[in-house]
Image (spheres, rainbow, N blue to C red):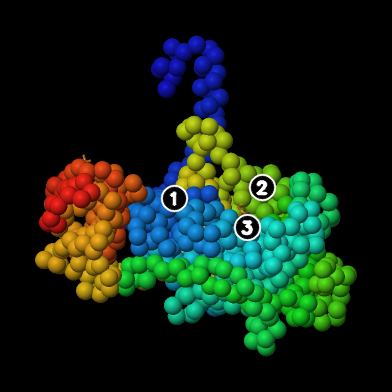
Amino acid sequence: MKSYLVLLSCASLTFILLSMQSCQPKGASAAVSSEAAKAVYVPPGKYDEYYDFVSGGFNGQLSVYGLPSGRLLKILPVFSVFPENGYGYSEETKAMLNSSHGFVPWDDLHHVSLSTTNGEHDGRWVFTNGVNTPRIARLDLANFKTMEIIELPNSAGNHSSPYITENTEYVVGSTRFSVPIGDKVDVPINTYKQNFKGTVSFVKVDPNSGRMNIAFQILTPGIDFDLARGGKNKSHDWFFFSCYNSERANTLLEVNASAKDKDFIMAINWKKAEEYAKAGKGKNWPVSYAHNIYDEKTHTATSTMIKEVLVLDPKDCPDMVYFMPCPKSPHGCDVDPSGEYIVGSGKLAAAIPVFSFTKMEQAIAAKNFEGTFEGIPVLKYDAVLHGEVQKPGLGPLHTEFDEKGNAYTSMFVSSEIVKWRVKDLKILDRVPTYYSIGHLSVMGGPTKKPYGKYMVAYNKITKDRYLPTGPELAQSAQLYDISGDKMKLLLDFPTVAEPHYAEALPASLIVKKNVKIYKIEENAHPYATKGEGLAKVTRNGNIVHVYMTAIRSHLTPDNIEGVKVGDSVYFHLTNLEQDWDVPHGFAIKHANNAEILIMPGETQTLAFKPDRPGIYPFYCTDFCSALHQEMQGYLRVSPVGSNVPLAF
Ligand code: K7E
Ligand code: RUQ
Ligand code: CUA
């Protein structure tokens, strides 16, 4: 470097030396860098140890990263249309994005829950939440597809979701924005205190198929629910939710919702709720919500509108809901692997309160209440507190746990992670994050048996970590080694859109599952074409169905005539391949929607309504073979009333 530095002026020399200081560590720290490089290096052709499922925030997608390498393996569309594979564009997948408000092709996806059996990952499903149009989605890890989306009625801002119970009995959602529900809908906003309410939805998950159904909703006061976790072991029957705005402000929340010294952690005994539901204590409310299911045999989604939901009012169901006071607008709400400790993170609090489940049970038995809030008993803070982590840093948000009894809390304001011991609340270590960390994720952190080893920080602000790519930089995740006493930063890696929570799974749980290829003979799509000889074009009125096949390297049929302006043409493309990673794509000039990408053995449909006569070329959009470029054809569209016969 020196050899050409001499040519530079003094000012630029100073600048370069300064930048060298910050980005080129020397001596001891250089050794750390090469150690870090080794720790995250996955040689070409080798696999990562963990699959990390990272929420995409405002892109409505989920992305899969390999850890420790930080390599992006896949983007899975959930709540947003995805031009890459036609999700939400193909006739088969449109119904996945249906709601009681019609087609909603976008959402804000914050959290991820990997299914567990007995509190440990079972590698079956991934649940995610749509915040904006309250929805919960289930993806299947046998095909990495969004298989089901259920809308939550009587709710708005489904933020504390999709957290699960220990055996994935239930997945929950709850209301961040209290809203008028039931028959009161159009009311003045300043009647917030009388008319605005929330709900918690308990969505039952079928243990075999994974199918979701809203079992019941619990009516709550109009305060804002933020995050949640299910209990474990002794707290198995309970669910915990953080909530802010117990002031019930409806304007300028930044001031008005921070007036009180304490808000709440809400504890719900869901086993009791189940009993009340069974005993007929609930009421069926008329509502309307969509339940969308993708069927693997027909490769088609269907959407059903459901017309009522069972609502339990805590007034009619004693001993089901309690409040624990929690300092200063808690955000995160996390349960340790033993199920004994519940951590509520008051964003504005100077300490992190840790509650004891045993003490909570005792306080409930002794009726140790400081009063009630909207008819719900409020337990005494001192009676339920295990203790407070003192001076942790500024802006505690989320906590995860390792296998050695330690907790890790993200500090948004002071941009750091603090490691502390759960038993005696002693702070053991702290590391900076770059910058303003939101969630963090320890491998297996929310399970009963965390794997530890790595932790990832998901930062909200990237500022100077990468060269500018415009005024906005990709969000930055950071990987830490947590196997020793001190946390060590190993790697920065950019993410897709804005990750909130993420959860990782040992790769062995996926590989063993043997993700499968669809067998062509099992394809039950009504317009499947199971062999090239069966390809055809049919007309019924002005509806034209094209039964098309794709195999390396041609589309059949590839010349189609007799289509007229104003016809509705459906290209049903069946991919006849039976090999790994040989999708074929399909696009036609001016089809105003998109392409579709068809996996081996699958059928997908692209609809096309030509608006003028002409010759419309179509082609395969995925480079599939040496003769991929030759995989093309023509559609002739004639004027209305022409008598060009149907031919193919
Ligand atoms: Cu803290 Cu939406 Cu989970 Cu983001 S939330 S950080
Ligand atoms: S072609 S390999 Cu369009 Cu050069 Cu892609
Ligand atoms: Cu098929 Cu390219």
Residue for point 72% across, 47% down: 394
Q: Disc 1 or disc 3, which is closer to the eye?
A: 3
Mark 2 within 8 Å of ligand 1, using the beta carbon: yes
Determine the CA span between mark 1 and mark 3.
31 Å
Q: Is residue 494 visible?
A: yes
Q: Which residue is mark 1?
A: 70
Kind of residue at badge 2: Phe
Give the residue drawn at x 23%, y 68%: 528
In the picture, measured across the screen, residue 600 lies left or right of residue 236, that is left
Q: Residues within 10 Å of mark 3 (few under 14, many from 20)?
A: many
Measure the alpha-carbon separation of dots 3 and 2. Answer: 22 Å
Q: Is residue 301 left or right of residue 282?
A: left
Q: Secondary structure at mark 1?
A: loop
Which three-letter amino acid code belongs to the residue tagged 1? Gly
Q: Position of residue 3 (x, y in %)?
A: 40, 17
Residue drawn 88% across and 70% down? 371
- Give the spatial CA distance, label 1 vs label 2: 22 Å
Neighbor class of circle 2 (other Cα within 10 Å; few <14, some 14-19, many 20+) is: many
Work out whether residue 85 or residue 476 is closer to the camera in this orientation and state it.
85
Task: Identify the residue position indicated by label 2 in the image.
Answer: 412
**Along the viewing direction, whichever of 395 and 636 lies nearer the viewer:** 636
SS for dot 3: loop
Q: Is residue 344 visible?
A: no
Asked if 122 appears above or below 70 in the picture, the reply is below
- Which of the two discs, 1 and 2, labels the residue nearer the N terminus? 1
- Identify the residue position indicated by label 3 in the image: 157
Query: Circle 1: is it few (<14), some (14-19), or many (20+) Cα within 10 Å?
Result: many
* Ligand 1 closer than 8 Å to label 1 CB: no
Looking at the rendered structure, the kind of residue marked 3 is Gly
Answer with the quarter of the image where residue 441 lies: bottom right
Where the N terminus falls, by quadrant?
Answer: top left
Residue 66 coordinates in the image, percent (x, y): 42, 55
